[in-house]
């Protein structure tokens, strides 16, 4: 009974999609024009009501029917920890906004194409064995899968996953559709080849984006500038964080040293240095005219950015680094929830944890190097960012393309608004400025091959951050051979794939 009720709810929510799709196809040779709205327009628990014109539809011929075929998605484990799956494992409507969006999305696609979208679970976010064994056996067990970003490079080189442009040409997958993130296709292509996707179809990659949170109570008590206003005016910089953090840092217990018992401008982890460098428009790798990545990390700008970051991250009177202190993330969460810092650097998954805190907080982009910098930049965590891939033994080109695009379009209508709702309700004001901030963060991801492919630069930076080392030139000189060798091997492997 509960399943029937939830399916009825799903069909009622998406009834305009059926009508709009049929009408559009009648008038445009069985194609559906994409509406112009590209930002979330509502959710299951409030917000503006979605209209037919603001919905998105996959370009699928009317009457397409796959006779109840199973469409299996290999995904992260179905567990309750931070990196347990939340994008595919909904079994029924529960009243929880993200769960219900996932469930209704899959029920809509099941009904639209007469398929059975079914999740299967890996042993962990770093699991590559499950998919590799399946492809080597040629059992066709999975139609699409999720892989951690860094693992997608390895699996591509090992011939386990499809090159997506070739797959698209052989079938129906629309890589130009608005539910795919165009940044990943442009940034991570090598010699015109792409192997991984992100976009509205999932929220797991968004959870891994590095951001800055700010405590609204401390902000008000010290009558500091509104960070959202600073952001809109382009002035959200490292210098601004130092200025504001300095004003609130205080030895609360008067013991003459800054510890967990005191208040800081910032709480962070060592990986902030790498993501902050990307935020400051440092390119670990850039691509040449042949779409081949080249190592461009070491530059005057990189040196200047590290020196600037040291004024924030290396000052123990302003910043508490829980990696340098050798404590876990939970004590850092507890500090922030107890109003022990104005700013908190973390990934977007931390927002759900912070909703338990009494004080209100906001979400900000990573800071710029200087006001003149062209926009804000962000990056995902290569070890857990979930990308969509297609197993090499999947030759169901038409069905896979249509089902995957239908899931993407339905996700843009349902899942993305629900994700915004989860991240902006409660302790984060659901107002225009917080929505605008999240829009900026998610739309400005730089998928830097030099950081995401595991060349060895990031581990060097983390060590520098924990030891307060600013001598980037000498540290990088020790790492150059490893970085060069790893990148050369990657390019050579891709040349083999291209040939």
Image: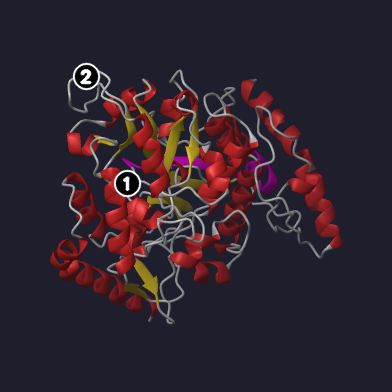
Q: Nearer the viewer, residue 396 or 162?
A: 162
Q: Is residue 180 left or right of residue 54?
A: left
Which image quadrant for residue 48?
A: top right
Query: At 49% across and 60% down in the image, what residue appears?
Result: 372
Q: Closer to the observer: label 2 or label 1?
A: 2
Tell me the residue at 51%/45% (across/down). Answer: 202
Q: For residue 120: magenta? A: yes
Q: Is residue 83 above or below residue 295?
A: above
Quarter of the image with the N terminus is top right
Q: Earlier in the sequence, mark 2 or mark 1?
A: 2
Secondary structure of residue under mark 1: helix
Quarter occupied by residue 259: top left
Q: Which residue does the numbered mark 2 point to in the structure image?
A: 254
Residue displayed at 26% across by 49% down: 310
In the image, what residue occupies the spot 38% across and 51% down? 147
**Mark 2 surroundings: few (<14), some (14-19) or many (≥20) residues within 10 A:** few
Residue that label 1 marks: 272
| Span highlighted in magenta in the image | 107-124
Colour pattern of the rendering: secondary structure
Q: Quadrant of the C terminus?
A: bottom left
In the image, residue 392 sits, relative to residue 247, either above or below, namely: below
The front one of 382 and 366 is 366
Q: Is residue 222 left or right of residue 434?
A: left
């Amino acid at each position: 009974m509960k399943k029937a009720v939830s399916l009825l709810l799903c069909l009622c929510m998406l009834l305009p999609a059926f009508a709009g799709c049929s009408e559009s196809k009648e008038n445009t040779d069985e194609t559906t024009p994409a509406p112009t709205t590209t930002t979330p327009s509502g959710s299951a628990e409030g917000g503006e009501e979605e209209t037919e014109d603001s919905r998105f539809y996959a370009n699928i011929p009317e009457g397409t029917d796959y006779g109840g075929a199973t469409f299996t998605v290999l995904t992260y484990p179905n567990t309750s920890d931070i990196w347990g799956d939340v994008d595919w494992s909904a079994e029924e409507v529960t009243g929880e906004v993200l769960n219900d969006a996932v469930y209704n999305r899959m029920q809509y696609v099941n009904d639209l194409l007469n398929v059975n979208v079914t999740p299967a679970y890996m042993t962990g976010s770093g699991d590559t064995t499950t998919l590799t064994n399946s492809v080597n056996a040629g059992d066709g067990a999975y139609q699409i899968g999720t892989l951690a970003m860094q693992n997608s490079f390895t699996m591509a080189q090992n011939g386990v996953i499809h090159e997506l442009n070739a797959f698209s040409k052989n079938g129906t997958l629309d890589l130009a559709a608005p539910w795919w993130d165009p940044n990943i296709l442009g940034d991570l292509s090598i010699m015109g080849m792409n192997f991984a996707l992100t976009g509205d179809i999932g929220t797991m990659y968004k959870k891994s984006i590095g951001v800055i949170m700010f405590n609204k109570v401390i902000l008000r008590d010290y009558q500091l500038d509104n960070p959202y206003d600073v952001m809109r005016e382009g002035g959200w910089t490292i210098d601004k964080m130092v200025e504001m953090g300095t004003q609130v840092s205080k030895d609360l217990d008067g013991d003459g040293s800054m510890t967990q018992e005191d208040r800081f401008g910032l709480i962070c982890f060592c990986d902030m240095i790498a993501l902050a460098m990307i935020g400051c428009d440092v390119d670990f790798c850039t691509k040449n005219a042949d779409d081949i990545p080249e190592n461009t990390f070491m530059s005057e700008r990189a040196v200047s950015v590290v020196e600037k970051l040291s004024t924030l991250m290396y000052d123990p009177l302003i910043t508490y680094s829980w990696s340098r202190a050798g404590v876990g993330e939970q004590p850092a969460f507890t500090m922030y929830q107890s109003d022990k810092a104005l700013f908190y650097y973390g990934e977007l998954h931390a927002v759900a944890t912070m909703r338990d805190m009494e004080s209100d907080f906001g979400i900000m982009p990573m800071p710029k190097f200087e006001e003149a910098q062209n926009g804000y930049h962000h990056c995902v965590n290569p070890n857990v960012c979930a990308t969509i891939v297609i197993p090499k033994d999947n030759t169901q080109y038409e069905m896979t393309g249509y089902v995957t695009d239908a899931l993407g379009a339905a996700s843009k209508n349902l899942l993305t608004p629900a994700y915004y709702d989860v991240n902006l309700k409660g302790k984060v004001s659901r107002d225009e400025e917080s929505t605008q901030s999240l829009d900026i963060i998610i739309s400005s991801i730089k998928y830097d091959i030099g950081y995401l492919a595991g060349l060895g630069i990031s581990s060097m930076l983390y060590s520098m951050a924990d030891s307060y080392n600013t001598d980037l030139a000498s540290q990088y000189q020790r790492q150059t051979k490893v970085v060069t060798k790893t990148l050369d091997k990657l390019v050579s492997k891709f040349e083999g794939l291209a040939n």
